[in-house]
Amino acid sequence: MRLSYRLIVGILVMLIVGMTARSTHSQNQPTTNTKSPPATAILFENVKIFNGSSPNLSAPSNLLVVDNKIEKISTTGINAPSGAALTRINGGGRVLMPGLIDNHVHIIMTASTLPELMSPNISAETLQARATKEAEQMLSRGFTTVRDMGGPTFDLKKAIDQGKTPGPRIYPSGAMISQTSGHGDFRSLTERPRRFGGELSRAEVMGAAFIADGRDEVLTATRENLRFGASQIKVMAGGGISSAYDPIDVTQYTLDELKAAVEAADDWGTYVTVHAYTPKAIQRAIEAGVKCIEHGQLIDEPTMRLLAEKNVWLSAQVFEEIENPNLTPDQLAKKKQVVQGVSNAFSWAKKYNVNLAWGTDFLFIPSRNKTQNADIVKLKEWFTPAEALKIVTRDNGRLLTLSGARNPYPGKLGVVETGAYADLILVQGNPLENLSIVADPDNNFKVIVKDGKIYKNTLGG
C-alpha cells in the first residue's frame, strides 16, 4: 500500500510540473492569431498596356497591384482585397508600361569626374553621397532596374533595398577585373605593380577594380566579388577608351585566365560578362564560356553569327562622339573607331536575331546623366518604337535572369504580367507611335511605381 501511495503521489507531482511548464511555455510564445498588417494595393483603371513584348497596346484595362506584385489584369472591373490600403489611379486612357532597365551603368563612376575619382583628397563618403543622389535621379527618370558593370555599389544597393533611400534595383558586379595594362588599370606610370613592390592603386582601394594576373589571382578576384554579393562578374577582355595605356585592338587575358573567372562564377550559379570590342577578344571570351559581351562595336559579321549560334548575349550601346575634356587625343581616336562600328553591331545583331540588350555606359560626365532616356530614342535608327521598348524592358529583363542562383530579385522584370514585379510607368502619349516620348520623363511619366511603391504620382489618387 505504501509503495502504491508513493507512486500515485509521484505521478501527481509530475503532472502538476508538466502542466505548469506547458503553461509557462505557452505564455512565452508569440500569439498565433495576430493579424498581419493590411496589404497595400494600387488599382490602375482605364489604361492601355504595353506588356513589354507585344507591338500593340491592350484594350482599355484595369490592373491591380498587391504589395510588390501585379495581382490581376482585366478589361472588366477589379475589386481590391479587403482591408488593403488602396491607392486608386484613373489612367484616363494613358499607356501603362514596364519600368525601364539600363543594363550597363556605373553609378559611382557616372556621378563624379575621373579626376575626382582618382584624387586621394576626396572621401569615399562624398563619392557614395553623389552616387546615392544619382540613383534617386535614375529612378525619377523611370529606370526601376539597373545592372552596374563595375564599382563599389554594394552598400548603395543594400540601402535602396532596405528603403533607406530611393533608387532602382541594382544588379552589382563589384570591382571590374582587369589584367595589368588592361582596361581596368588606371595607375599612373610612376606606380609600380604589386608584384614588383607597388601598392594597391586608387581604383583598387575604392573598390572599382581588381588588377589580377594569372589564373590564381583571377580566381581570387572573382570569388572576392562573389563574397561581397555580386550578381554577375565583369572581366575586361579587350582594349578600352577611357584607360590610357591599352590600344583598342588589344586582346586581354589568356584563355585560361578567362576560364578561371567563368568556372568560379559558374560554381556560384552565375555568369561572366566581358568588356570587348574586337572579333578576337569576343571569340576568345566565347570559347572560355562567357555568356555576355559588353559593347562589341568592332565586331565582324562572322563573329556576330557565332554569338547567335552560341546563344551569347550582346549588351550594346549607341555611342556617339561628344565633347569630353577628360579624354586625351589618343583616347578620342579610340572613341572614334568604336563609334564608327555602332551601326554594324546593331544591324547585324538584328539580322542574326542575337540576344540583344541595351545600356548607356555613361562615365565621368555627371551632367550627361540626364540624357539617359534620350539614348533609348537613338535605337529608332534600327528598330521600331515597339522593338526598342521591348529591348529596354523585356529583353533586358531576360538578360538579368542569367544571374541564376545569385539573382537578387528572382521574379519577373521588364514585363506587365500577372505575378511580375510591380515596376510600372504611366505615360502621357503613346511611345509605340512616338518613341521620343520617353526622352522627357519629367513631363511624360505621370506615375512611377517600383516594387509596388509609388515614387511619383502627378495624377493624385
Image (cartoon, grey):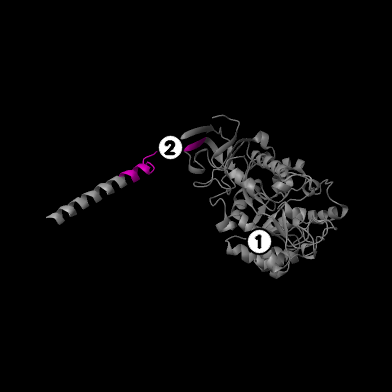
Which residue, given by chain and number where applicable, does mark 1 sit on? 222
Q: Residue at x 83, y 54 (%)?
A: 336
Q: Is residue 454 left or right of residue 317?
A: left
Residue 32 drawn in magenta: yes
Residue lying furthest right in this view?
A: 329
Quarter of the figure with the N terminus: bottom left
Amino acid type, mark 1: Thr
Query: Which of the pair 200/47 is nearer the observer?
Result: 200
Location of residue 265 (image quadrant)? bottom right
Quarter of the figure with the C terminus: top right
Q: Is residue 88 above or below residue 212?
A: above
Residue 264 drawn in magenta: no
Q: Is residue 200 left or right of residue 405?
A: right
Query: Which of the pair 19/190 is nearer the observer?
Result: 19
Say what secondary structure mark 2 lies in. Answer: loop
Q: Is residue 89 left or right of residue 84?
A: right
Q: Which mark is residue 405?
A: none
Residue 354 visible in the picture: no
Q: Is residue 176 above or below residue 445?
A: below
Marks counted in the figure total: 2
Span of residues in magenta: 23-44
Residue lying furthest top in this view?
A: 460
Which residue, given by chain and number where applicable, does mark 2 sit on? 81
Amino acid type, mark 2: Pro
Q: Residues within 10 Å of mark 1 (few under 14, many from 20)?
A: many
Disc number lying in front (1 or 2): 1
Q: In the rendered structure, which disc, 1 or 2, sits on the residue that comes first in sequence?
A: 2
Q: Residues within 10 Å of mark 2 (few under 14, many from 20)?
A: some
Residue 292 on image: x %, y % = 66, 60
Query: Which of the pair 33/30 is nearer the observer?
Result: 30
Say what secondary structure mark 1 lies in. Answer: helix
Query: Which of the pair 371/10 is nearer the observer?
Result: 10
